[in-house]
Image (cartoon, grey):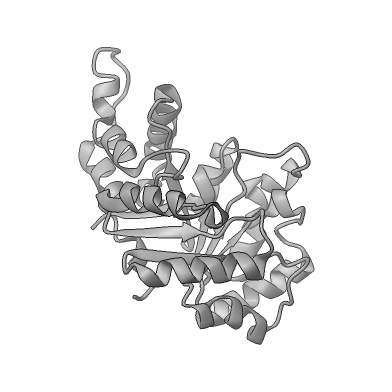
């Protein structure tokens, strides 16, 4: 089974984006679609829910802004489970809140109760007004310690703070990251994968494409052909089975998502 744990779709752009997203996801069995952070949360979640309900392979994550949305069990349930959405995505730099803000901590408590995994989309691309301080992965350490049964995904390996992410993955059983690689950035892909292998956290990596920034099929090909990238350069390689396990990992089961 192949699960793309990181895709987006611009719901306001009409059917063209929908068709392109469906075509891109043909290469995978299931696809997590993250609501975008540049829309009002309730509107974004309702539009996403309408989309994912039409296609069995699509799994939606609701966007929540703890500074502007009501944070009660009833409100979070209506934004997620009542709409058929299976998790929560947060944009701390974009929405300008510290990951451990008191209102955010209340949200995590509710998410743990409802068994909703969290996806921290704190990596770029950043807008000029985004608060980069709130993108640091180490800020999630407090959350992982306080909510040990809450499934947490650090988006895009926490780029550009990759080493902090790997430290968290090694430290906390409940933390994961999606390996959204850019196939044309060969050196970046090589360094991320080899660093994860050397840190002993390969089993914490989930496959993701970051669509529309990259195509799932091209990302899969780049990962499975990883060692060919450096075959003639006499650089360290990573066992192919370790890389294949990332692509074929049962990510939905890992995140506690039931269909």
| Spot occupied by residue 120 in the image (x, y as percentages of width and height) | 58, 55
Q: Is residue 124 left or right of residue 58?
A: right
Q: Quadrant of residue 179?
A: top left
Q: Residue at x 45, y 27 (%)?
A: 188
| Spot occupied by residue 80 in the image (x, y as percentages of width and height) | 55, 76
| Spot occupied by residue 78 in the image (x, y as percentages of width and height) | 59, 82
Q: Residue furthest bottom?
A: 74
Placement of the C terminus among the 4 image quadrants? bottom left
Q: Which of 45 and 203 lies nearest the eye of the viewer?
A: 45
Q: Quadrant of residue 18?
A: bottom left
| Spot occupied by residue 85 in the image (x, y as percentages of width and height) | 48, 73
Q: Taking the image as drawn, is residue 185 in sight?
A: yes
Q: Residue at x 50, y 43 (%)?
A: 157
Q: Is residue 196 left or right of residue 143?
A: left
Image position of 252 with respect to 153: above or below: below
Q: Which of 133 and 4 lies nearest the eye of the viewer?
A: 4
Placement of the N terminus among the 4 image quadrants? bottom left
- Number of marks in the image? 0
Q: Residue at x 39, y 24 (%)?
A: 186
Q: Residue at x 59, y 63 (%)?
A: 144
């Amino acid at each position: 089974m192949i699960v793309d744990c990181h895709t987006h779709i611009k719901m306001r752009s009409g059917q063209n984006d929908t068709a392109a997203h469906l075509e891109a996801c043909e290469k995978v069995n299931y696809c997590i679609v993250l609501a975008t952070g540049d829309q009002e949360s309730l509107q974004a979640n309702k539009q996403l829910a309408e989309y994912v309900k039409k296609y069995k392979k699509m799994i939606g994550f609701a966007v929540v802004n703890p500074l502007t949305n009501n944070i009660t069990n009833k409100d979070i349930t209506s934004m997620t489970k009542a709409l058929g959405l299976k998790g929560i995505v947060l944009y701390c730099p974009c929405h300008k809140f510290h990951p451990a803000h008191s209102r955010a901590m209340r949200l995590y408590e509710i998410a743990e109760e409802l068994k909703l995994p969290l996806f921290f989309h704190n990596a770029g691309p950043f807008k000029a007004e985004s608060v980069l301080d709130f993108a640091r992965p180490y800020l999630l350490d407090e959350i992982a310690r306080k909510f040990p049964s809450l499934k947490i995904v650090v988006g895009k390996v926490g780029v550009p703070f990759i080493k902090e992410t790997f430290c968290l993955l090694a430290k906390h059983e409940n933390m994961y990251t999606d390996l959204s690689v850019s196939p044309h950035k060969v050196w970046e892909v090589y360094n991320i994968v080899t660093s994860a292998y050397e840190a002993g956290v390969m089993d914490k990596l989930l496959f993701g494409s970051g669509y529309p920034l990259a195509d799932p099929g091209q990302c899969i090909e780049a990962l499975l052909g990883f060692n060919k990238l450096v075959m003639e350069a006499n650089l360290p390689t990573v066992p192919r089975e370790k890389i294949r396990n990332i692509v074929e990992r049962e990510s939905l089961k890992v995140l506690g998502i039931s269909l």
